[in-house]
Amino acid sequence: MRFLDAEGRYAPSDSAAEFAAELDGVGLEDFKAWYRDMVETRAFDTECTHLQRQGQLALWVPSVGQEGCQVGLARASEPQDTIFPAYREHAVAKIRGVPLVKVAALFRGLTHGGWDVNDPANGNFRLYTLVLGAQTQHATGYALGQLLDAKHRAGDTSMEPGEAGTATGEATMVFYGDGTSSQGDANEAMVFAASYQTPEVFVVQNNRWAISVPVTRQSRTPLYRRALGFGIRSVQIDGNDPLAAYAVGRRFLRLAREGNGPGYIEALTYRIGAHTTSDDPTRYREEQELRDWERRDPIDRLEAYLREQGVEDDFFADVRAGADRDAKRIRDEILALPAPEPDSMFAHVYAEEHPRIEEQRAWLAHYEASFAGQEGAGA
Ligand SMILES: Cc1ncc(C[n+]2csc(CCOP(=O)(O)OP(=O)(O)O)c2C)c(N)n1
Ligand SMILES: [Mg+2]
């Protein structure tokens, strides 16, 4: 399902007709804001890759190429909705209000969480989750809570979830990848979501790869069709078309809030960069595949559409300059952060002291001490 073709022309697929009404009232100023979201996220992302190479971040997980679906879906959400991300949803974090320096601090090893999920300023954007699929369970549990709260408010204190029909007024949206769709957790989350008709939207960003494993190995059937087997409505969208993501996201989130149960969106996109800064994709994927996907870049596509609508050079120059300024500001903020405290990683593993942990802590302290006196030690 898409509205914009690969060249950015407005050319809705047949399946788009049923979602077109979701774009009513969305106009050029919105599309320009979405464009700005994408360009700013990419500038930040590129900066973080550089900072990792300069030793300022321990690891970086690029989102380059996946900004289209992320921006459309984030813009489709309402403030009262709750979002459970994986670890690559930088555009969603930004739009929901999480300061991007907090995302960078996580990858610097400065925090075990990242941001205060109870602070409304952070937009009900939960913590990044690197344990694949764990967030799907958190999301379904949370959505079940939203449902039971709504029943309670309506005077039904039975604590029985039951059939669809209870409007919650708020929904949960959970992001994960094509590889994660094979995890037991993700499948169990869908079973419970369908059984109890949770107000939830599952978003699978199918970026074709789970590190070096292609999606063709994960599933013999398109991922969106799996959801149908769980009894969950689903659509496969062009994940590099923010209009498609917005339209389906808006529809599915509204259906969820109004008591019509969960939905599932498979966003077909591509991970243009490496899996993380620890990965070298040239070892397992073809150069040609990358080139083909670079031609479908979500930013170029929306830019072509905006130009077609009469938006002129000065707008694009202004967006780029603003994104560069922002990235520079965040860079300065990151450089001003303290060095991580390696010992802190042992602090929260067990409630009480544990001999294995003490052994590892002592080993690390010894290793760290071996750098004493060397330039950059401890940084
Ligand atoms: C439970 C678990 N198993 C394995 C890993 C190692 N791992 C990290 S990312 C990844 C691939 C995930 O691929 P996908 O779900 O497609 O998401 P993408 O990284 O492509 O966005 C793997 C296997 C992990 N983090 N957690
Ligand atoms: Mg993937």
Image: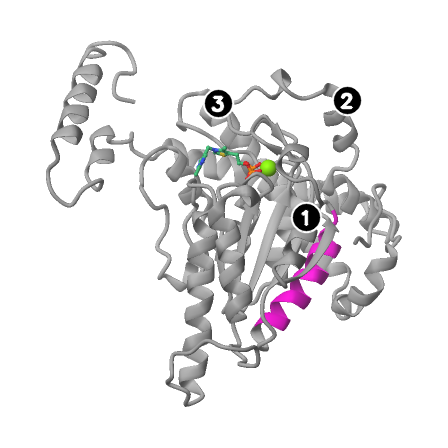
Image quadrant holding the C terminus, namely top left
Q: In this view, does 200 lie to the left or right of 16?
A: left
Kindly identify the amino acid type of the residue bearing the numbered disc 1: Ala
Q: Are marks 1 and 3 in contact (CB under 8 Å)?
A: no
Quickly name the residue at label 2: 288
Quickly name the residue at label 1: 267
Q: In this view, does 363 lie above or below 178?
A: above
Kindly identify the amino acid type of the residue bearing the numbered disc 3: Ser
Name the residue: 40% across, 44% down: 102
Pinpoint residue 115: horizontal percent, then vertical percent.
37, 50
Is 246 magenta? The answer is yes
Q: Residues within 10 Å of mark 3 (few under 14, many from 20)?
A: few
The residues bearing labels 2 and 3 have C-alpha atoms spaced at a distance of 22 Å
Name the residue: 55% across, 65% down: 194
Task: Give whichever of 97, 319 is nearer the camera.
Answer: 97
Task: Give whichever of 49, 200 is nearer the camera.
Answer: 200
Q: Do the residues labelled 2 and 3 touch (CB within 8 Å)?
A: no
Start-end of magenta stretch: 241-256
The residues bearing labels 1 and 3 have C-alpha atoms spaced at a distance of 25 Å
Mark 2 or mark 1, which has the lower sequence index? Answer: 1
Pinpoint residue 331: horizontal percent, then vertical percent.
46, 34
Quickly name the residue at label 3: 278
Asked if the residue at label 1 sits under 8 Å from ligand 2, the reply is no
